[in-house]
Image: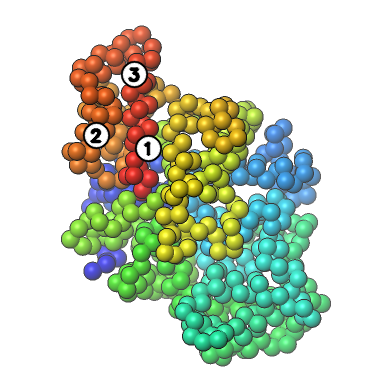
Amino acid sequence: MASLTPMQGALGHRHAAHLLRRTSYRYTKTKVDEMAGQTASQALATLLQLYPQKLDQPIYSDGSTWINPPGTSSPAQDFMLRPWVMSWWINEAVQDPGIGHRMTFFLHQYNALDMTAFATTHFYDYLALLRWAALGNFKKLALKMITDNCMLRYLNNTENSENNPNENFAREFFELFTIGKGPQIGPGDYTNYTEDDIVAAARLLTGFRIRGQRDNIDPETMIPHGFANPARHDDMPKKFSDKFGGTEIPGSSDVPGMWAELAALVDMTFAQNETARNFCRRVYRYFVSRNITDEIENDIIGPLADTFIAADFEIKPVLEQLFQSQHFFDMDDSDNADEIIGGIIKSPVELVLQALSFYEIPLPDPLTETDAYFQFYNRGVVQRMFAQANMPLFFPPDVAGYPGNYQSPDFHRQWFNSSTIVARYKLPEILLSGKLTIGGSANQPLGVKLDIASWIKNSGVISDATDPYVLVQDLLVYMLPESTDNDRFNYFYITIFLDNLPPADWTYEWQNYLNTGDDTEVKIPLERLINSIMYSAEYQLF
């Protein structure tokens, strides 16, 4: 039976690596080893935190900023600034030792919009709002997202007025952002709401507008947001169906009344148990498994939703309960290696960022190596490693987000198909060569490079590099989610690394490298091994 009972005792290596891979973009040997001696609760105490960012905002090519304080003039046209926002976010994500950026991206998937919805300053505010809520209160986020400037523009609420209602925002508020519609019962009638409820909600949302100057500040988040315009608002009562207990929200003709209507809409929606269940399902699919059976629905989703409601929709208690559970570690049935660990295909974000952190790739400093920083993150990561692997960062195909995270029945399998496999398999070659080897800029310098011999020597991942058996074993332990059987190990060890030569040959060449500093002979088998491991089906999973 699927169980949320907390797992007892120290995590050990396997469970520590699993927990770190699923909760953080920063995957390192040091952190795995530290967590291995901790309980799940102790490990989560450091993972479930928002750590200070290295830079509080993006920079431009000349090192200038344009976002904070509000009113700072832009150093370039807006379309030229967008890549700098993405570069900044990725640089922060790969160095974040906690769950902050991974939760921010989860909430971006949940409340999806694209970077062109409004100016880059407003997209920064959107990201700041997601970060503010990452370990905070989801109900508050749902309320504040309604007046986020980017979301107001993206979902056409700027066109929603008393005499010309637009239902786009109201529809997505119910279907995607909160309760979900559930199976259709009849024409215009879904399990959790009706088309008439969308009409009523659209009327309630009339008159909420974007504020381009960024001078309308939310006193709780200190983040700029939109404003209420009573002249464009439908001031009549809004009646909802029996799905919401026949709730009627009084109309209003002034600013405080409009905000009160918004709060009432959110209260009404979150009073339905299905809103909590829908959130917990999406957390489960994102962090644990895409497969939700009746057993999972009853034994995992239901109790998590109860925790969520009891905590007044605080996110952190749900994550704490889930990430400590026997189920998360696949310890709640007779086979502890058949469902969860190594059960999700990495998106390009996990694939790239966890590789960068594991190999301790020397990242260019945005302030002192600005050109190299932009070359690496924008041309290398965003345009090559992400976009060509079907991850257009912050440009999801539609308001439902990235198909690999939500589109059934394939879900994560969409990250690994005939159109994405080349870009995924080029990652080790790009890192080892230091060149962009895919796309129209082939052989263009990447700006960073993995010096594999030096890394093997100095990283601490390999306990004894003179012993080829130990070297391969240590790499596989940290790079793959599960241990290999003898046949698979011998494939990496004998066929790939040794190339069927005697182990003593490697020992001799490695010692020669240590004595002379010439890595010519050791680099070839090491690169062959790294490529093979990162090509493997096991490495594509986490």
- When asked about the image quadrant of residue 328, the answer is bottom left
Q: Is residue 284 visible?
A: yes
Residue drawn at x 66%, y 72% is: 168
Residue type (three-letter) at the residue carrying disc 1: Met
Q: Nearer the viewer, mark 3 or mark 2?
A: 2
Residue located beneath label 3 in the image: 522
Q: Residue furthest top?
A: 516
Residue type (three-letter) at the residue carrying disc 3: Val
Is tag 3's residue or tag 1's residue first in the polypeptide sequence? 3
The disc at residue 534 is 1
Give the structural element (helix, strand or loop) at label 2: helix
Marks 2 and 1 close (CB-CB < 8 Å): no
Residue located beneath label 2 in the image: 491
Q: CA distance from mark 3 to mark 1?
A: 19 Å
Q: CA distance from mark 3 to mark 2?
A: 19 Å
Q: Position of residue 327 (x, y in %)?
A: 28, 61
